[in-house]
Image (cartoon, rainbow, N blue to C red):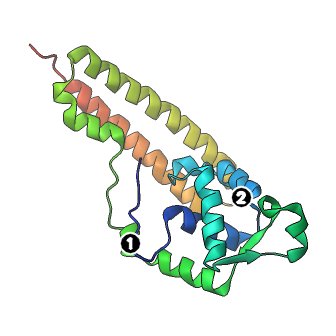
Amino acid sequence: MWFMPKPADTLTLADVVVLAMLAERAMHGYELWAELERRQVRDWAAISRPQVYYSLKKLDAERHIEPERRAADSLGPERRSYRPTARGRRALADALARDDWATQRPPPPFHTWMVLSWQARPDDAAAQIARRRAFLEQELENERIALTSIIEETSSSSDAAMMVRLAIRLFETELEWLDEVQRRHRPAP
């Protein structure tokens, strides 16, 4: 899984995602996680539900977020809706300006496997390549369906639509590359 290292005194990836979502509208933890799942967070950010709740507590303690209204306190902290403070909006803007967003190459596990695959048994190598192809084809289909939904909900030029188009192109390119891999793949003697 891809992991963005945390420079000293900065927000984690989960913190940034939580702040950005709360900048859209105030939400409580469960609602926030449900929205992240709806947006298929696992496809674009390696964060978990516990990390979201941890970030809410941390961001609250650091005064980056505040409860939307104190009357909701009677429902308990798990139902308290939060919104970013001015300090939180500055922290979010600062976090989004970091150069590490644009200067990393996160390797997918399959790419690591490819580098090591010369040690794999020929049948296992062929099976892994076939698994990767099937996975990519399914993901490509999922992204095409998601793109249609996103365009209906937003527009064809929305940031979300552009990101899904990028994913589609990446999957298509990797499928073409797998064709090359299979053509050159020779069983070991």
Task: Report the side of 2 relative to 52 (left or right).
Answer: left
Nearest the viewer among 170 and 157 is 170
Q: Image point 68% across, 82% down: which residue?
A: 85
How far apart marks 1 and 2 lie (CA) works out to 25 Å
Provide the secondary structure element on which disc 1 rests: loop
Residue 71: give its label.
none
Nearest the viewer among 48 and 130 is 48
Q: Position of residue 184 (x, y in %)?
A: 18, 27
Q: Position of residue 24 (x, y in %)?
A: 70, 70
Q: Position of residue 2 (x, y in %)?
A: 40, 51
Q: Earlier in the sequence, mark 1 or mark 2?
A: 1
Nearest the viewer among 18 and 72 is 72
Q: Is residue 43 visible to us here? A: yes
Question: Residue at label 2?
Answer: 32
Q: Is residue 180 above or below residue 66?
A: above
Nearest the viewer among 143 and 100 is 100
Mark 2: which amino acid? Leu
Q: Is residue 156 visible to us here? A: no
